[in-house]
């Protein structure tokens, strides 16, 4: 897949385009341009290391929102087998922003709870831009209780700008739905692992984020508020989003220092959208290690650790 560069990646993109032109010229005219090509390849690697090795908080937020970044269903396809999506909260409707279901993770059957965004306008309208309604959280809780009943661990993949703040959402009590999930997940008698794979936006993320282990991808973020909303409140202007992102300490490395998350899952240089298989392998490995560790603990100890 050809990746779309973000604004701060344009210098790398320009060098790569020049490299491609040089290679095509060499092939077309049968000219030996290998020394120039090697030199340009070295420049591309150096520029990429220089830019991606010194990312600001706001740049990481941009990578976390990249439209080509792998979403939850991409990870399900690569890390799980026998995925069966289950629909509806048995009260109001099915929420397409939160595909949830049963899957095999290695030899372990588990419940998988996710947020899902779309890559184009049609998909985003169907998925409501990854912003769930109350029925999404109630569906997730229904499945988590099913997991508890049959001794299946819960794995939650978080990627949402936040819960949907519209009138219908408020009419059906979004805050109550999230609050009930927080309470019930705290006492669920099976291992729970949460992984922030893109955006971890406020209560929308926390509604499926109470867990025994919280993982986060290297360029994902997890925050009580989006940088734009924070900027609008503090500066009365959304243009200060970059400053807000730094102040919020929302990057994976900041969150690990603050002990909000337990582990950072590495991504390929430039972000997860550069290599789906490699980042899925890293996430799968981290989930497997966490699950193996949690399954050794007696339930009473697991619940006590979760409470602490």
Image (tube, rainbow, N blue to C red):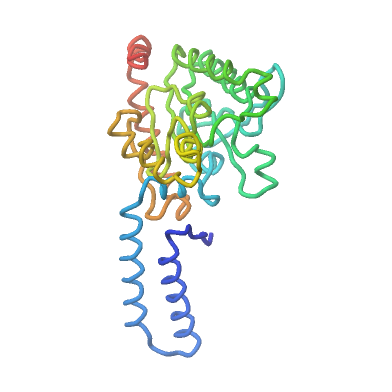
Q: 266 left or right of 105?
A: left
Residue situated in front as seen by the camera: 149 or 174 = 174
Q: Residue furthest top?
A: 300
Q: 286 left or right of 99?
A: left
**Which corner quadrant of the image does residue 132 belong to?**
top right
Residue situated in front as seen by the camera: 249 or 214 = 249
**Which corner quadrant of the image does residue 287 belong to?**
top left
User: Residue sitting at 45 percent across and 89 percent down?
Assistant: 30
User: Residue sitting at 66 percent across and 33 percent down?
Assistant: 96
Callout count: 0
- Residue 97: x and y in percent read 62, 34
Q: 112 left or right of 33?
A: right
Quarter holding the C terminus is top left
State whether residue 216 is above or below residue 43: above
Residue situated in front as seen by the camera: 51 or 38 = 51
User: Residue sitting at 36 percent across and 13 percent down?
Assistant: 307
Q: Residue furthest front?
A: 236
Q: Residue furthest left?
A: 257
State whether residue 67 is above or below residue 153: below
State whether residue 247 is above or below residue 300: below
- Residue 302: x and y in percent read 35, 15
- Residue 90: x and y in percent read 69, 17
- Residue 182: x and y in percent read 48, 17
């Amino acid at each position: 897949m050809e990746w779309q560069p973000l604004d701060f990646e344009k210098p790398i993109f320009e060098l790569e385009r020049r490299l491609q032109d040089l290679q095509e010229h060499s092939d077309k005219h049968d000219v030996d341009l290998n020394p120039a090509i090697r030199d340009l390849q070295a420049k591309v690697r150096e520029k990429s290391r220089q830019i991606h090795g010194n990312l600001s908080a706001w740049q990481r937020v941009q990578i976390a929102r990249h439209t080509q970044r792998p979403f939850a269903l991409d990870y399900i396809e690569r890390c799980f087998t026998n995925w069966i999506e289950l629909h509806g909260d048995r009260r109001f409707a099915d929420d397409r922003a939160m595909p949830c279901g049963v899957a095999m993770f290695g030899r372990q059957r588990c419940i998988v709870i996710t947020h899902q965004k779309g890559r184009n306008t049609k998909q985003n309208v169907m998925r409501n831009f990854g912003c769930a309604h109350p029925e999404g959280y109630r569906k997730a809780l229904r499945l988590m209780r099913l997991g508890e009943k049959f001794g299946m661990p819960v794995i939650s993949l978080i990627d949402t700008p936040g819960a949907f703040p519209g009138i219908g959402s408020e009419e059906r009590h979004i805050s109550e739905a999230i609050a009930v999930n927080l309470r019930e997940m705290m006492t669920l008698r099976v291992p729970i692992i949460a992984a922030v794979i893109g955006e971890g936006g406020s209560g929308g993320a926390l509604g499926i984020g109470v867990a025994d282990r919280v993982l986060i991808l290297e360029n994902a973020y997890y925050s009580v508020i989006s940088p734009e909303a924070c900027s609008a409140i503090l500066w009365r202007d959304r243009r200060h989003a970059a400053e807000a992102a730094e102040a919020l300490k929302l990057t994976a490395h900041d969150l690990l220092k603050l002990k909000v998350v337990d582990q950072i899952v590495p991504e390929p240089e430039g972000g997860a959208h550069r290599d789906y298989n490699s980042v899925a392998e890293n996430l799968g490995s981290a989930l497997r290690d966490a699950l193996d560790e949690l399954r050794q603990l007696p339930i009473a100890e697991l619940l006590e650790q979760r409470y602490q």
